[in-house]
Image (tube, helix red, strand yellow):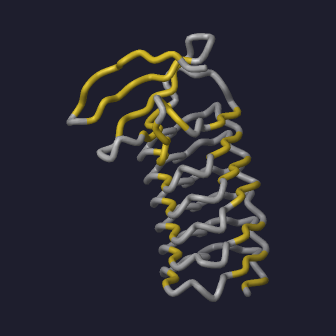
Amino acid sequence: SFRVLVHELQALALDVRMLDEDGNEVEVTMNEDGTYSVIGIGTCPDTEIVVPRMYKGKAITAIGNSAFKYNQKITSIKIPSNVTSIGNLAFYQCESLKEVTIADGLISIGYWAFYDCEILEIITLPSTLKSIDYSAFYNCATLKSINLPDGLTSLGASVFAYCVALESISIPNSVTELGASAFYCCRVLTNIT
């Protein structure tokens, strides 16, 4: 139920704003393969974001770099199964973000993706996830636990550094790369399996 307003043509990618029934904007851009990426919140006032699966008959396959960076209003986000990547700094310093639900389909989480999301308490990671880049969850200070899926192969440096409430974590046997200081300053982390 979105109407579309063509926003601008930039560097071979068509940027558009999806309008909800109240005229609030969520920004997307066309990828080289004809799919779309969410690149910003625009003027959408919603605090609980549900990323749509499709736009103009094409899948939304990514949350772009810095898409929601510094957003102080978002409290939760649900990401559908056709999204395969969360870009670098996508939710950087989203200080009100408490809950993230990601459906199966996601393959990678970029660096600093959830950096300084200090009140993030719940994140559901999909079984399809293969890599989490460096400092992706740096200083998620209220995150107590996280389930890493079987099939995950790479955890970047400082990926959970300063997650001071993190109590336990299970690292799957599939992980072949564990970056330096992955759990630096996780003061109450007593159980790593």
- Identified at 39% across, 25% down, the residue is 16
Hey, which residue is sitting farthest left in the picture?
11
Q: Give the vertical position of 54 relative to 23 (above or below).
A: below
Q: In this view, does 159 lie to the left or right of 29?
A: right
Q: Which of 17 and 165 is in front in this view?
A: 17
Across and down, in percent, residue 15 comes to 35, 28
Q: How many labels does the image show?
A: 0
Residue at figure coordinates x 60%, y 67% from the top left: 128
Q: Position of residue 42 (x, y in %)?
A: 49, 24
Quarter of the picture containing the N terminus is top right
Residue 182 vs residue 146: left or right? left
Q: Is residue 29 above or below residue 137?
A: above
Pick the residue in front: 164 or 42: 42
Left or right of residue 118: residue 55: left
Quarter that holds the C terminus: bottom right
Q: Which residue is drawn at 41% across and 47% down?
A: 65
The residue that appears at 31% across and 30% down in the rendered structure is 14
Task: Note whether 136 is above or below 28 in the view shown.
Answer: below
Give the x, y percent position of residue 54. Answer: 53, 36
Q: Which of 40 and 114 is in front in this view?
A: 40
For residue 111, what is the image quadrant?
bottom left
Toward the top, the furthest residue is 22
Image x and y of residue 13, in percent: 28, 35
